[in-house]
Image: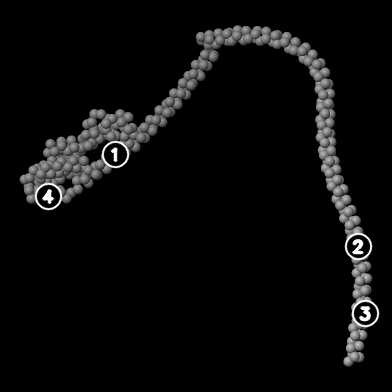
Amino acid sequence: MSIAFAEKPDSEANVEILRVARQIQHLAHFLSQGPAFSGVVLTEDDLRTARDLNPVTRITSHRRLSELEFPREWVEDDGALAIALHDWREQVEGMKQSNSHATEEEPDQVADIPTEADIKVDSDVSFLSYSMKREAHWVEKTKELEKKLRQSEQEKQSAIQYNLKLQLEVEALQRKAQSLYQALFDPDNRIHEANVMAKVKLHGEIRQLEKLLDAANSKNESLVKKNKDLESCNKGLITENEELVKIQELESSNKDLVTENGALVEENRDIDSDNGYLIATSKDLLTKIALARDAAKSYKDLMNRNAALADTNKRLEESLKKIVTDAKCSLRSVS
């Protein structure tokens, strides 16, 4: 901004930039409660403009509370919101008074005309620092108010719950007292009338029960006679049942014997078949034994024949040896 102002001090763009910068400075001064900036004229119109630009002033002058971005417990509780807005208005009025005192005490500073050096110095200052400090201050205040409102809401809820509990206890005690008074004094004579009606009803029910008891007794006597007849019949049936049970037991035992006999017959059949097989095998063995005996006899005969043949072979060998020796001797004699 300082470079543009130095090059073209009379241009419309620079004038507009300076006007906006002044408004920002007014707003920063108004929010931070600090001293006025050097080279800036703070007139009543400028303060009014800064007051209009202040978001706190906008919020407090708003009519509809539901459109404001406050916490819901503030909007629901008009009293707490009114207290918070009242505190804010007091702080705003205090800031306005401090600004007015500052302007009255320093008339020469307000009447100063800005120069290029002042504009350069002001351009280097961070305007956002003042607004951030003021915003942090308001955030802290709103947090404290929210904390107080929550505490008051909790206390209010606990008090409401305690009052409801006491109210319920009082209503229960009132009902008990009413019932006790009704039971002790019976002002409307309702209990007596109810007792009389209950007695009449009970007497009627007793008469009906007596009639029913007489009818039941007569029925019971007839049933007793029938039971005696049935008992005599039951005795005959019991003897018959016992005989039938014995017969059934005999039949069951006979069935068991029949099944056992059948099993024995099957076993005998198996034994007979086994005996036939054994007889056949014994016959085969006897034939084999007879053949073995015949074979033994023939073997003995063969052994005897072999022994005789061996004797004859020995004799033949001896005779052959003699013949050979005789032949050798004859050959020697001839030679």
Q: Amino acid at mark 3?
A: Ser
Q: Secondary structure at mark 2?
A: helix
Label 4 and label 1: CA atoms lie apart by 37 Å
Q: Amino acid at mark 2?
A: Ser
Query: Where, by quadrant of the figure, is residue 300 drawn?
Result: bottom right
Q: Nearer the viewer, residue 276 or 50?
A: 276
Q: Secondary structure at mark 1?
A: helix
Label 2 and label 4: CA atoms lie apart by 159 Å
Q: Considering the image in quadrants, where does the C terminus appear?
A: bottom right
Residue that mark 3 sits on = 319
Residue that mark 4 sits on = 2
Residue that mark 1 sits on = 141
Label 3 and label 4: CA atoms lie apart by 172 Å
Query: Does the residue at mark 1 contact the one at mark 2 (Cβ under 8 Å)?
Result: no
Q: Secondary structure at mark 3?
A: helix
At label 1, counting other C-alpha atoms closer than 10 Å, the crowd grade (few under 14, some 14-19, many 20 or more) is some
- Could you tell me which residue is drawn at 21 percent across and 45 percent down? 128
Q: Nearer the viewer, residue 254 or 239?
A: 254
Instruction: From this view, report whether residue 164 is shown above or below residue 99.
Output: above
- Could you tell me which residue is drawn at 93 percent across and 73 percent down? 311
| Scheme of colours in the image | one colour
Q: Secondary structure at mark 4?
A: helix
The x, y position of residue 9, in whole percent, is 7, 47
Asked if residue 133 shows in the view, the reply is yes
Residue that mark 2 sits on = 298
- Could you tell me which residue is drawn at 28 percent across and 40 percent down? 139
Query: Does the residue at mark 4 contact the one at mark 1 (Cβ under 8 Å)?
Result: no
